[in-house]
Amino acid sequence: MPHTTPSPTELLASVFGFSAFRPGQKDIVDAVLGGKNTLAIMPTGGGKSLCFQLPALCREGITVVISPLIALMRDQVRALQEAGVVAGALTSGNTEEETDAVWNAIEAGTLKLLYIAPERLASSGTERMLKRAGCNLIAVDEAHCVSQWGHDFRPDYLRIGELRKTLDVPLAAFTATADAETREEIVTRLFDGTPPETFLHGFDRPNLTLAFAAKDSPRNQILGFAAARKGQSGIVYCGTRNKTESLARALREAGHSACHYHGGMEADDRRIVERRFQAEDGLIVVATIAFGMGIDKPDIRWVAHADLPKSVEAYYQEIGRAGRDGAPADTLTLYGSDDIRFRRQQIDEGLAPPEMKFADHARLNALLGLAEAHECRRKSLLAYFGDTEVTCGNCDLCETPPDLFDATTSVRKALSAILRTDERFGAGHLIDILLGNATDRICQRGHDALPTFGVGQEHSKPIWQAIFRQMMGQDLIRPDPERHGAFRMTQAARPILRGEANITLRRDTLKTADRRPAVKA
Ligand code: ADP
Ligand code: ZN
């Protein structure tokens, strides 16, 4: 290394081989170099690691990097070493030689970046060692791991705040998870509640067309979407393994080149699909979420969800695999009552503590809000990530603004039917009551004598189904985890029932009745 430290821009080229900073990187690098506490929120693949690796090279002493995944650490260390940077990791995966090399570099004062797993912070020696080694910057990768309500919570991350105070050095935190609650928790736990300089960049993907559609005849909807993009590489995400196989078959029958992919396949078979997708033009892969992690194909022209993903983050991640080359790419996400019920049940039946379930329902609500959004899809999506300055013109709702109507009266009737039957019935039975269908089941239970019997004849059965779906989407009603299919009213519905609030629904998505897919594997 020469004695005069090269500028960040020089290092960007000479060490990392990049000709320019990505949007946002320069500001973050400057803040970290200036010794400020920072929190940077960037999507996966946005280029976070450079934002601490580059300052580490410019600063005196060692930068300690805390990261939750050993494989990720080893990758980064290898890449840095190949670029001629003295970097090392202390993890349980080390060979003895690797560990010796790290200690020697610390002794010699040549080490610039030291990666450690959070578990190491539990041993009292680590703090002393870092102090003696001249650690002058803490970088925290995947900082959302400090959040107890997230799925990646790592208890040892809670020790980082203490480490920052003991070492008395600046801390730079990085994450791709940006919902407001998580961010607040990061500030509390890592920065003792004093807001760091915060950067949020790069979530908008203007070349992606965003669209959602209520499930009508889902298989045909996907076939139609694919037909309009024949010969282009695409991914269809499905909720189940079986569906990937049947849908891939249907696509082949429609003349596409398509194959399925899921975690239950042999590793070799999976690799064949990955290679084909990478190499071929115009292959469609119908997959579960197992597909995508290692996919680095820039010219995926479309991504479709045959089933609703589990959160806004998952949705964003999955559609984000399209159009990496910057050229236009299309996305379509289907959703229906069954999806909502399935996702709610998944949360309720999980083993998570009640607070975490509450947070998961809230995350699902955010996605459902996006699905039945009343204004620009991109604005709703990016608002979730905290980005409010958005121009769009490239989503289904900008193209065709949704047709809204005041649905207060209908929703009140539906809620009243739910309450008068003690929250024990699902949509089918409730709709029979609203329509005044004196079925055997209705008569046996005396529901034909209810004041709500027959009060909903202004709508057809499919319209009522769509109203119930939108009510689920707005979290006014939830499937009862104890009783399959039965609806319970949520707190959010009370003001509507009491006449203190009105409710607006989308008329356009009422037209798509929520028919069950013809289940044929
Ligand atoms: P993240 O940690 O945000 O998911 P990475 O730091 O792994 O992302 O970076 C993602 C990819 O972008 C890497 O392949 C990296 O080499 C590349 N990259 C980062 N910064 C730049 C840049 N300024 N110019 C070009 N490529 C970059
Ligand atoms: Zn829009």
Image (cartoon, rainbow, N blue to C red):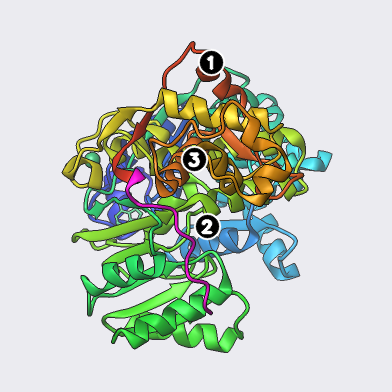
The first of marks 1 and 2 along the sequence is: 2
Q: Classify 312 as above or below 83.
A: above
Residue depicted at 44% across the width and 52% down the height: 315
Q: In x, y percent, where is residue 441?
A: 68, 49
In the shown orientation, is residue 229 left or right of residue 483? left
Residue depicted at 29% across the width and 32% down the height: 404
Q: Nearer the viewer, residue 163 or 381?
A: 381
Residue bearing the label numbered 2: 86
Q: Main secondary structure of the magenta part?
A: loop
Residue depicted at 45% across the width and 84% down the height: 273
What SS does tag 3 mark? helix
Amino acid type for the residue under numbered disc 3: Leu
Q: Nearer the viewer, residue 148 or 452?
A: 452
Q: Which mark is residue 435?
A: 3
Q: Is residue 60 visible?
A: no
Q: Which mark is residue 495?
A: 1
The first of marks 3 and 2 along the sequence is: 2
Label 3 vs label 1: CA separation? Answer: 25 Å
Q: Classify 135 as above or below 304.
A: above
In the shown orientation, is residue 26 left or right of residue 291? left
Amino acid type for the residue under numbered disc 2: Val
Range drawn in magenta? 510-521
Q: In x, y percent, where is residue 200?
A: 38, 34
Q: Nearer the viewer, residue 250 or 136?
A: 250
Camera-side mark, 3 or 1: 3
* Mark 2 crowd level (few <14, some 14–19, many ≥20, 10 Å Cα): some
* Mark 1 crowd level (few <14, some 14–19, many ≥20, 10 Å Cα): few
Q: In x, y percent, where is residue 501?
A: 46, 15
Label 1 vs label 2: CA separation? Answer: 62 Å
Camera-side mark, 3 or 2: 3
What SS does tag 2 mark? loop
